[in-house]
Amino acid sequence: VSCAVRRGSKQMSQIGPASLERVDPPHGFPAEVDVLGQTWRIVYCSNLTTEHGLYGRTDPAQRLILIDTSQARTMMEDTLWHELLHAALATSACHDLDDIIEERVLRTLTPAVLSVLKKTRPWWRRRNV
């Protein structure tokens, strides 16, 4: 299980539904996404960081992403993209990467990918390319 960790690391089984204070998705944030043809649910929680030391968490077995809403909005966006990249790796042929290596790679790639996405006109949505 991959995660964006603030302090420590917990197995997904240690983060049971009873321990999560679920909240509605913040305005503009998705409740689910399609990752390489698979639907992933996104659950927003107000206490993931305070109770479990995590900003976000990805559970490939359940196709579930947890995001803590106590973060600043821009940080929450970054965390969601980071977790979506974990989901993409879990869904792809790279699903068997070592957790430590995967986390290092994504901590490097996430800011780079976000920088390009935020600074580039959405050319991928235009039909005449």
Image: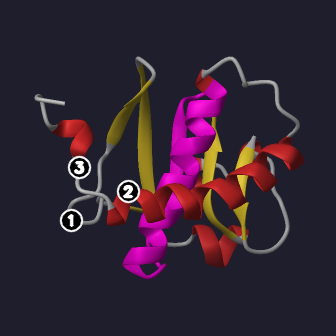
**Measured Cα–Cα span from mark 3 to mark 1:** 21 Å
Residue 34 position, x and y percent, is 37, 28
Which residue is denoted by mark 3 in the rendering? 122
Q: Earlier in the sequence, mark 3 or mark 2?
A: 2
Residue plotted at (80% across, 74% down): 7
Q: Tell me where residue 99 sits by quadrant.
A: top right
Q: Is residue 126 above or below residue 101?
A: above
Q: Residues within 10 Å of mark 2 (few under 14, many from 20)?
A: few
Residue plotted at (55% across, 72% down): 47
Q: Residues within 10 Å of mark 3 (few under 14, many from 20)?
A: few
Which residue is denoted by mark 2 in the rendering? 117
Residue 36 position, x and y percent, is 45, 21
Residue 91 position, x and y percent, is 59, 23
Q: Is residue 128 above or below residue 68?
A: above
The main secondary structure of the magenta stretch is: helix
Asked whether the viewer can see residue 127, the reply is yes
Tell us which disc is closer to us: 3 or 1: 3
Which residue is denoted by mark 1 in the rendering? 27
Which three-letter amino acid code belongs to the residue tagged 1? His
Q: Quadrant of the N terminus?
A: top right
Q: Tell me where residue 87 sits by quadrant.
A: top right
Q: Which stretch is magenta?
A: 61-90
Residue 27 position, x and y percent, is 21, 65
**Measured Cα–Cα span from mark 2 to mark 1:** 20 Å
Q: What kind of element bears circle 3?
A: loop
Nearer to the camera, 5 or 82: 82
Answer left or right for 15 relative to 119: right
